[in-house]
Amino acid sequence: MPKITYIEHNGKSHKLDVENGLTVMEGAVQNNIPGIDADCGGGCACATCHVYVEKKWFNKLQKKESSEEDMLDVAFEPNSFSRLSCQITISDELDGLVVKMPSKQA
Ligand code: FES
C-alpha cells in the first residue's frame, strides 16, 4: 500500500498506508488526521481539503480539472503547489507522497 505523509500546519507529521483508489482526502478522514475537514465529502465544492503538495511530487499528480482550479481560487492562501486532496487519487506511483495542510485548517 502506498505511504502518504500528512503534515499538520504545526509540523506534526502522520505517515499512513493508504489504499490504492482512495483519495488523499479519504485517507486523512478515515484516519482522523486533523486539518482536512472535507466538508463537502469530496465534491470539489468546499476547499477544506486544501493541501500543499511537496514540490517533487507536484508534477506527478493527475492534472487539475477546471472545477478544482475554481475552488483553489477561493481557498485559503493557495500557492503554486496547492491541490484539493479530494481530487488526488492514490496509486502506487504516489508511494511516498507528502502533503502539508494550510494554517487555517488546524
Ligand atoms: S472535500 Fe470539499 S473540495 Fe475536497
Image: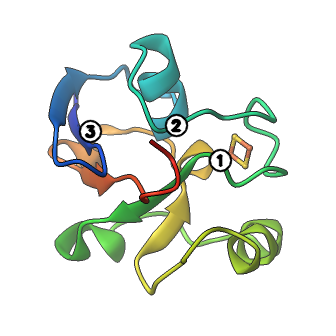
Q: How many marks?
A: 3
Q: Secondary structure at mark 1?
A: loop
Q: Quadrant of ligand 1?
A: top right
Find the distance from the CA under tag 2 to the CA under tag 1. Answer: 6 Å
Find the distance from the CA under tag 3 to the CA under tag 1. Answer: 25 Å
Q: Residue at x 43, y 25 (%)?
A: 27
Q: Is residue 41 visible?
A: yes
User: Would you say the beta carbon of the disc 2 residue lies within 8 angstroms of ligand 1?
Assistant: yes
Residue highlighted by disc 2? 36
Q: Earlier in the sequence, mark 2 or mark 3?
A: 2
Q: Residue at x 68, y 72 (%)?
A: 72
Which numbered disc covers residue 48? Answer: 1
- x then y, percent, for residue 63: 57, 72
Q: Is residue 13 above or below residue 11?
A: above
Q: In the image, what residue type sits under mark 3?
A: Asp
Q: Residue at x 23, y 50 (%)?
A: 97
Residue highlighted by disc 3? 92
Question: Farthest residue in the bottom direction?
Answer: 80
User: Would you say the beta carbon of the disc 1 residue lies within 8 angstroms of ligand 1?
Assistant: yes
Q: Residue at x 15, y 29 (%)?
A: 15
Q: In the image, what residue type sits under mark 2?
A: Ile
User: Badge 1: how crowded within 10 Å, few (<14), some, or many (20+)?
Assistant: many
